[in-house]
Amino acid sequence: MTRFHVVIPARYGSTRLPAKPLALIDGLPMVVQTARSVAKANPASLMVATDDQRIVDVVESAGFQACMTRPDHPSGSDRVLEVVDRLGLHVDDIVINVQGDEPLIPAQVLQQLASALEVSDAGVATLCERIQTRAEVFNPNIVKVVRDQAGHGLYFSRAPIPWARAHFQIESAGLPEEPGHFRHIGVYAYRVSALRRFVSLPPGRLEQVEALEQLRLLENGFPILVLDSAVSVPGGVDTPDDLQRINNRVP
């Protein structure tokens, strides 16, 4: 099995769901549930990176490692890099960024990402899955991705891409079978060298327009390998409704 590391950035503040990492899912803090899901993938190391001692305390009480990082990081990627530097990881090591609000992340997809990146010329790999409904294609909160023939991302957008001109001109609840529409799943595997380069780049114009961090890489000519997720990945938790949805799920 490919050797990889996982860092879980978990910031205490959240506009839509205050103290989100500590929100309870099945009686346990969300960040702990995320760490438990990640641990099933058997990473070489697993670290929760946070800006709040309360998160450190609950993570360590659950038997996982956590560290306090700088409070002024502009993104989770910057927080992950701080941990990478603290751990002294090699430039060719693989590190996966799993957000702390992904409590149901399947272990299988983390292994899939690491294995694919190990043999890829790209320095970054991420996931997608097919969109099944027209409503999801037109939902700006669901990020869409289109890829080239080698599976590299051509563009990520909140807009409905690709624009199926003929199909969208008619009243239909369905979607064209080809080339298909795919939602981006925001879990990233990086070679350390690529993560370091990414964080060093200034925010891109398209990144700022779409509010999508991954566009910074494409704007600067860095390929992103986009894999069809081996299994379905449940959505993360952004709002109180998401939290209720996950707590009400049928195990």
Image: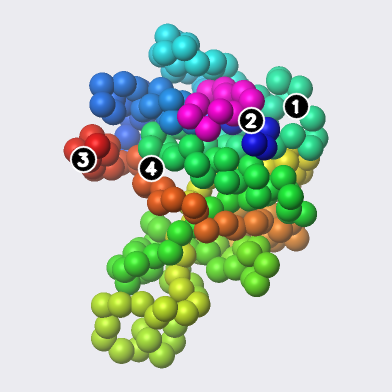
Cα distance in 3D space between marks 1 and 4: 28 Å
Which numbered circle lies on residue 89?
1
Cα distance in 3D space between marks 2 and 3: 31 Å
The answer to whether residue 42 is magenta is yes
Q: Dot 2: within a 10 Å radius of its alpha carbon, few (fewer than 14), some, or many (20 or more) residues?
A: many
Name the residue furthest front.
1
Proximity of marks 3 and 1: CB atoms separated by less than 8 Å: no
Which numbered circle lies on residue 5?
2
Location of mark 4 (residue): 236
Q: Nearer the viewer, mark 4 or mark 3?
A: 3
Query: Would you identify the image quadrant in which residue 77 lies?
Result: top right
Span shown in magenta: 39-48
**Amino acid, disc 1:** Leu
Q: Earlier in the sequence, mark 3 or mark 1?
A: 1
**Amino acid, disc 2:** His
Q: Earlier in the sequence, mark 2 or mark 4?
A: 2
Residue name at image x 26 percent, y 26 percent? 26
- Residue 195, image x and y in percent? 71, 41
Proximity of marks 2 and 1: CB atoms separated by less than 8 Å: yes
Residue 164 is left or right of residue 41, and the answer is: left
